[in-house]
Amino acid sequence: MPRPCCLRHININPCVVYFKPAGIPVHRLEEVVLALDELEALRLADLNGLYQEQAAEQMKISRPTFSRVVAQARQKVADALIHGKALRIEIGSAALPLDARRDKLIAIRLPVSRCKGKGRGKYHDKKG
């Protein structure tokens, strides 16, 4: 049985969860799926301009894990832009409540299929 993944703290509630090239019907497009933690990593690193260490602290994950998450997110976004694919942001099984406020921090646990099981230590969900 694989080790459970650490909780990843997300402080984003996306208003739009689907982007596609103009003029192409959805049924003819390939789709790239961007996970919510990958979107948060992009927001912290590229939009907010935080260093990886600071961003990793905010997500409550290690710096190497953050590095892998943000690299994977950048690769997916580049693939969608360069190859004209649709980009879908997947909220997943840890869906945000419908009335979630933007200033409230949430924590998600990734499905086992996304876990690599290489992390050390465990972060606990802090309510607040």
Image (cartoon, rainbow, N blue to C red):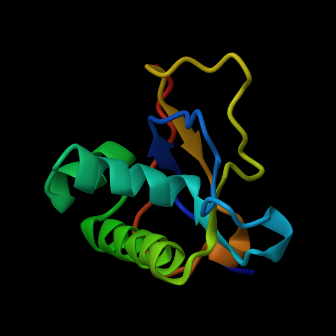
Residue 85 image point, x, y percent: 62, 74
Q: Is residue 112 above or below residue 88?
A: below
Camera-nearest residue between 37 and 3: 37
Farthest residue, direction right:
27
Q: Quadrant of residue 45?
A: bottom left
Image quadrant holding the N terminus, namely: bottom right
**Relative to residue 121, is residue 45 drawn left or right?**
left
**Relative to residue 96, is residue 26 drawn left or right?**
right
Question: What residue sits 78% from the left and 50% below the top?
Answer: 93
Residue 25 image point, x, y percent: 79, 64
**Relative to residue 89, is residue 73 drawn left or right?**
left
Camera-nearest residue between 34 and 103: 34
Question: What residue sits 58% from the left and 63% below the top?
Answer: 34
Question: What residue sits 55% from the left and 17% below the top?
Answer: 101
Question: What residue sits 50% from the left and 75% below the top?
Answer: 76
Q: Is residue 6 visible?
A: yes
Residue 22 image point, x, y percent: 62, 59
Camera-nearest residue between 54 and 92: 92
Q: Quadrant of residue 65?
A: bottom left
Q: Quadrant of residue 103?
A: top left
Q: Is residue 3 visible?
A: no
Residue 82 image point, x, y percent: 45, 80
